[in-house]
Image (cartoon, rainbow, N blue to C red):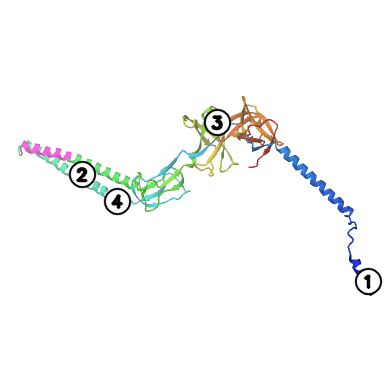
Amino acid sequence: MSAEPDKKALLGQLRIERDAEPAGPAPGRRTRIIGGVVVLIVLLGGGAWLALSARGALPVHTALAQALGGGGAGASVLDATGYVTARREATVSAQMTGKVTEVLFDEGDRVKQGQVIARLDDTAQKAALAQAQAQLQSAQALLAQDAAQLAQSVRDVARDEDLVKRNLVSQQAVEQARTQVDTGKAQLEAQRKQIELAAANVRSAQVALDYCTVRAPFAGVVIAKAAQVGEIVSPLSAGGGFTRTGIGTLVDMDSLEIEVDVNEAYINRVEPGQPVESVLNAYPDWRIPSHVIAIIPTADRSKATVKVRIGFDVKDARIVPDMGVRVSFEEKAAAGASAQQRPRGVLVPAGALRKDGSEDVVYVLKDRRAQRRAVTVGAASGDSRVVLGGLSPGESVIIDAPAGIRDDAAVTEIKQ
């Protein structure tokens, strides 16, 4: 009977008291929880504030205003783009139709004036020359024969005249001898003409033979090789695509210059001899001193432009035909003017400019605000415009500003 109370006592020790109070967190843990809640509230409040403040900001695209001018004799008054061209460029061809037997050049080779650059098959021309020379020699031999016969006829006349005085021959015999002399003189003159004709045939055959040798018409650099050994070349197109009309293209590198199209509204800013700064697209950091050679006295009606020729003041092997180039027409600095007094300008995209009444304005991005600026606009340069006043190099201008933009409006820059 004593074992039953012992079991009850053990079960009583294993019971869980539900009415007991749970133990609370430690004081340090409670502090950390409260701090985290406060930080979360602050972050949520800051994000909401930023969202509310950015709700009225206008999204905009921007571009940097680029410096213009700054070197040479003066500041830039006009910018334009064009290409490097060669005043002396020729596609060299044979002066007759023939098969190419030798090509003595490759692209990039520099040749001298008169240098042999190709040869054609000259078998027929050599044969024709030999025939013409033989005909000339034959005509010369006949001339000697006719000259000997004439000399004999002259002696016969003198003998007959002496005999007629002694009544040994009739007067008719003397007259026949004189006729023979006249005939001999005519034959001799005709033979001389035959010799001239034969000599002309020799020269013609020699010219045809020389046509088989193609020479450089001027000193320059070969930029294209159009024919190979075994191909047929001709000065005229034979059709069908099987006959070449040229052997190679030669360029006189000393004749390189720039051709640009200037809007006719700004051609009054350009004059012959004006200093120009040229920058090749291939070498944007290389500024080449140049000058205006001439203004072509005609306008392109469809583009409303006038062509201007610009010459390089320095020659360099890096300059090659058909390179893109950007030029800045400069004005000469006034006498005694310092470099700081020279006008400067910046280049901005055309979409940054707006009309506000009679004023040209741009909006500059500054501290997330659109700042209105009245500017002085210069010439166009492709898709850009020159701003002569009101902007500084390096400032961010707003492109294609929204219609509702105003001075000091809140804006958000869209990264491109």
Between discs 4 and 2, the one toward the N terminus: 4
Mark 3 crowdedness (10 Å alpha carbons): few <14, some 14-19, many ≥20: some
The amino acid at mark 1 is Pro
State the CA–CA distance, disc 2 to disc 1.
Answer: 171 Å
Between discs 3 and 4, the one toward the N terminus: 4
Secondary structure of the residue carrying numbered label 2: helix
Does residue 395 sit above or below 318 in this rendering? above
Q: Nearer the viewer, mark 2 or mark 1?
A: 1
Q: Position of residue 106 (x, y in %)?
A: 45, 50
What residue does disc 4 label?
124
Q: Is 145 on the left or on the right of 95, as rendered?
A: left
The amino acid at mark 2 is Leu
State the CA–CA distance, disc 2 to disc 3.
Answer: 70 Å
Mark 2 crowdedness (10 Å alpha carbons): few <14, some 14-19, many ≥20: many
The amino acid at mark 4 is Ala
Q: Nearer the viewer, mark 2 or mark 3?
A: 3
Labels 4 & 2 near each other (Cβ < 8 A): no
Q: Position of residue 90 (x, y in %)?
A: 42, 42
Can residue 302 be seen?
Answer: yes
- In which quarter of the view is residue 331 placed? top right
Q: Nearer the viewer, residue 225 or 153?
A: 225
Task: Please tell me which residue is depicted at 85% across the width and 51% down the height of the picture.
Answer: 32
What residue does disc 3 label?
274
Residue stretch rendered in magenta on the structure = 169-186
What residue does disc 1 label?
5
Task: Please tell me which residue is depicted at 57% across the width and 32% down the height of the picture.
Answer: 380
Q: Is 136 on the left or on the right of 256, as rendered?
A: left
What residue does disc 2 label?
143
Which residue is outermost to the front? 1
Between discs 1 and 3, the one toward the N terminus: 1
Mark 4 crowdedness (10 Å alpha carbons): few <14, some 14-19, many ≥20: few
